[in-house]
Image (spheres, helix red, strand yellow):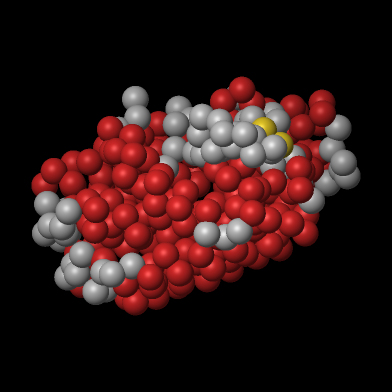
Amino acid sequence: MAPPILEKAAAMCEGELRAAVGRLGSELSRPAFYHFGWTDAGGVPQSANGGKGVRSALALLSATAAGAAAETGVPGAVAVELVHNFSLIHDDIIDGDSRRRHRPTVWAVWGVGQAVIVGDALASLAQQVLLDSQVPNRCAAASRLARATSSMIVGQANDMAGEGLAEISVAACEEMERGKTGALLGAAASIGAELAGATAEQLSALEEFGVELGLAFQATDDVLGIWGDPSRTGKPAWSDLRQCKASLPVAAAMAAGGHHAEELRHLLGQRPCPEDGLARAALVVEQAGGRAYCEEAARLHKQSALQALESAPLAAPSRRQLADMAEFVVQRAF
């Protein structure tokens, strides 16, 4: 069951998020509204299906964990959601994904060029939202988000560099995921506290919690990327294998060596890999222990995230809610 903070975060932030995106002008806001699930491609309002809102919920919780009102974290929550969605729009282009959340992606509807510009606009808007807020610590929060965004982009570049390789080490894969996913979750889990004027000790603990949670989140996503149910994920079966992604299950299976690794090199070396080859590759990864490794990695990173919460003075109710968020993130695929 989803933690109540997700619904609360959506109620508190969606109006501000819509208002911010609406300032972009019709050429940019129309595809952005569509991406967030607020309208169809023709601009007709729809019930939103814009994702779970994990990052905005973390931003609000980090504010209350530092002893401030949840409202203090709203500019940070909106900014983080804008950066996250800029990355999704660009990721869909990079991966060639024509569907997200059971609908055509922005590039599939408006073309690659327009989708690139929309993503760029959301990234820029995130900084504007923070700097235009009246919170005294807005510049520190903007700097925190900018650092995380840079790390995320570097992680994405490393992910792209690893596509199509015969194999990638588990260590290299985990370092890539620390940047690609961990950095932004680290910012989400600390940006509200930054806006609230938290201590360095609190900020460090919350950021570490977020980074570790991000690694658990990505390990879970890697499982879904191969074995996820398309009716739930909104993406085709074996999507990560189809794109030859250097994901953690594949890296772990390759590291196991033996005949499984040899078969994987053969299967994933085909361009394009036939559908029956993808099904076989998914089975081989699982037989080689790749899925089990990923599930254990998710559990261990979740444990590290929870331990980080114990290292600093944080408001007890928010600490419990952050722990609930960690459980929710890891249980999505299992």
Residue 303, quarter of the rendered image? top left
Task: Identify the residue shown where x is 79% and y is 51%.
Answer: 111
x, y percentage for residue 143? 39, 75
Residue 195 visible in the picture: yes
x, y percentage for residue 279? 74, 27
x, y percentage for residue 7? 33, 35
Which image quadrant: the N terminus?
A: top left
Task: Identify the residue shown where x is 82% and y is 42%.
Answer: 266
Q: Is residue 267 left or right of residue 30?
A: right
- The answer to which of 150 and 330 lies nearer the viewer is 150
x, y percentage for residue 262? 76, 43
Task: Identify the residue shown where x is 35% and y is 60%.
Answer: 76
Q: Please, is residue 330 above or below residue 140 in the view?
A: above
Task: Identify the residue shown where x is 24% and y is 74%.
Answer: 136
- The answer to which of 181 and 25 lies nearer the viewer is 25
Q: Please, is residue 135 above or below residue 188 in the view?
A: below
Which image quadrant: the C terminus?
A: top left
Q: Is residue 175 left or right of residue 137?
A: right
